[in-house]
Image (cartoon, rainbow, N blue to C red):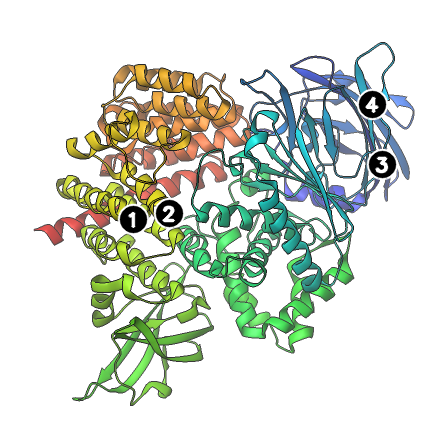
Amino acid sequence: MAGNLTRDEARERARILSVDSYDVQLDLTSGDQTFSSTTVIRFSSTETGAATFVDLTAPTVREIELNGTALAPADVFDGERIALPSLQADNELRVVADAAYMRTGEGLHRFVDPVDGSTYLYSQFETADAHRMYACFDQPDLKASFELTVLAPAEYEVVSNSAPDASREPVEGSEAVRWHFPATPRMSTYITALIAGPYHVVRDEHDGIPLGLYCRASLAEYLDADAILDVTRQGFDFFHGLFGVRYPFGKYDQLFVPEFNAGAMENAGAVTFLEDYVFRSRVTDARYERRAETILHEMAHMWFGDLVTMRWWDDLWLNESFATYASVYCQAEATKWKDAWTTFANVEKAWALRQDQLPSTHPIAADIPDMQAVEVNFDGITYAKGASVLKQLVAYVGVDAFFAGVRAYFAEHAWGNTELSDLLRQLEHASGRDLSLWSREWLETAGVNTMRPEFEVDGEGNFTSFAVLQEAAADYPTLRSHRLAIGLYDRTDNGIVRRERVELDVTGERTAVAELVGKAQPDLVLINDDDLTFIKLRLDERSLQTVVDGAGEISESLPRALAFSAAWDMTRDGEMAARDYVRLVVSGLGGVGDVAVVQTLQRQALGALINYADPAWRAEGFDLLAARLRDLLSTAEAGSDLQLAYAHGFADSARSPEHLSLLQGLFDGAIAVDGLEIDTDLRWTLLRRLVAAGAADETEIAAELERDATATGARAAAGCRAAIPTPEAKALAWERMTGGDLANAEFRSTLGGFIEPAHAELLREYTEKYFALLKEAWEKWTGEFAQTFAEVAYPSYLVEKETLDRTDVYLETENPAPALRRLLLEGRAGVERALHARSKDAEAGA
């Protein structure tokens, strides 16, 4: 992982420098490996004669001129940095370089569409890859204005942060066209952007803001522009009222781009999205809900992140947690997804709880000493726990006071950089509350609290005492202050419904709840009703039995999700046998009408079987789950989202010859289910399971790729080929992954097929190969590839003590970089947790 800027270096550079402007000129017509990049930077220094450096990663640097004096590239450029000696008060730097197109999803990524041969480019600069396209001071607190000129083929659309000039200038003697983008407001390098290629465009306007939607021409028929624009309009209207500041960047383009490494990126005025959000096959409403959350998340960043930006990556959570909280809040208040907080509880909070129990857990306000540390910190703490804690803060100070403080924060710091204290000061002023204790408890400590009810009942079944017990892990002993609610739920003819709700502050190890004394014990006691705080929830014996017997009968979606989540937490912690959790899902799934919850439960049941079930019972468990999903598939409403969700769940869980035969019939058309279309993406899902089970091979893969000769088809085929259960297929996949020739998306797909959990014995020999390659991969591969390999290729499929021991040996003998050590400790913790849970499950079967 090259180019590791440290926090101390960034602070020193920011201490002496102030950057005024960038003038960047790019020529995209000079070849398919490199492009010409000329940058002029105007900046000042507080220390005359001081030395600093500018960031640039490029195969060739042709000219460097500082204040009219030529500097020899061989003397000052080391491949990643240009040394700048003897600064003046006012400086002008000019750098001419040949920069490289990337295939890793970093810098300026280049993709050729196999459908029509068209070339598409897009930039991805977070955390610090702008210097792969132009020379720059690549850190968030050295903001500047950016003016961009681009020479591009005549058929290209070119997009950047500002709207281009109306005229396009043909370049004399060439088929190229010159695009000019006027200077932007002051912004950070990581949110600058360039997207170019023969993109399909849909244009619109809302509230005076020009809107653009872009995707590859070969995907144009699938771009549901009206649905995307509806969410966009709803977001702007809601955020304008909520934030008190109009959208600050003029036009707003949303671009769906190929081979993207993340869900989206908040480039100012030019947001890039993973093009999988252009749905070419039918998906459930849960996918549309997640796409809407992503759209609104990136839109919230236009204010929190782009208009006002963190000073350094220690406060990355401020960007991501706020955008996550704001997007879900907007969904619940301003869009059709009124149950967005249920999805948040199922998805984001589950992610946060998992991350917060790893040995790498960290405070939300993290210590980020360098760029390697931040690159592994885009995690469940930074996004999901932070957003959960913001939700707790809103409950603590009140929603009106919270957003009054946010509005004052935007007004005070527009176009600037901030730290956590700047936001807390405005929230304290608006709410009248001292937030120093809250910050220490919630933002500056790690770990999650566990809460359980403690009560006694009299002969008539009424509470004679009731208290909430709070626990903390031994390594992270903080007992926090929580604002939460307790719900009492009874079985009725209308399902399991809430009879009563009490909201209170919980502090310390034990908090008495006098309001519940004398109340009849319900069938279900739900601590953290309405999901106000961030905790692990435990159920008393009667409540757990109610959930096991009839979780699907809980009438409201959020408490139902919380009850399932409590059972899942207990399974992961080895307090509930994996087989009991699978049986809970099997019994309760048919009563759940929320498709997002259904899909979450299916994923968790599969995870329980793969990771936490005793191997001796696993086959029975897969049959139990698959049989239930088969039955639900056959009885679901034709053409419904639930039917589609059951189909995917059945495909993922099928293992027995009977169930694989049904999959084969669905795949080849011999079996039909009324209303279920076996479209392109579902065909790949069915084929992947058949291949992994040894029921299909290269013949079927090649035929399917011929049917779907697209980039998505190529990725799916790569994953299927790596999932063939033979030594030869695994060896070929390993060679392709480690040979350095794959683009990022195909690399991830191949790796995903390679590590098929059912193939653990086939993969045993790759444990040593993994550890032997790890150091070289970390030091020489780009950050995205190195991190993905270290994390995903870790031998977590071998749940045995030998995996723990081998990891320990590597950690001790190789002393890896802190970021790599973190990833290895996370992998090790997953194996250790699985060993504990499997032991619990084996006991249950004894």
Q: Residue under circle 4?
A: 178
Say which mark, if any, is on residue 182. 3
- Position of 286 with respect to 565 (left or right) is right
Q: Secondary structure at mark 1?
A: loop
Q: Amino acid at mark 4?
A: Arg
Q: Residue under circle 2?
A: 640
CA gap between label 4 and label 2 equals 50 Å
CA gap between label 2 and label 3 equals 49 Å
Q: Nearer the viewer, residue 559 or 456?
A: 559
User: Which part of the image, by quadrant, shows the N terminus?
Assistant: top right
Q: Amino acid at mark 3?
A: Pro
Q: How many marks?
A: 4
Q: Amino acid at mark 2?
A: Ser
Label 4 packing within 10 angstroms: few (<14), some (14-19), many (20+): some
- Image height of 221 relative to 828, above or below: above
- Position of 376 with respect to 357 (left or right) is right
Q: Position of residue 497 (x, y in %)?
A: 32, 73
Residue at 73 percent across and 60 percent down: it is: 410
Q: Position of residue 561 (x, y in %)?
A: 36, 60
Circles 3 and 4, Cβ within 8 Å, touching? The answer is: no
Say which mark, if any, is on residue 636. 1
Snapshot quadrant of residue 553:
bottom left
Q: Position of residue 711 (x, y in %)?
A: 50, 23
Snapshot quadrant of residue 474:
bottom left
Q: Secondary structure at mark 4?
A: strand
**Nearer the observer, disc 1 or disc 3?**
1
- Position of 68 with respect to 432 (left or right) is right
Q: Can I make out residue 782 in this image?
A: yes
CA gap between label 1 and label 3 equals 55 Å
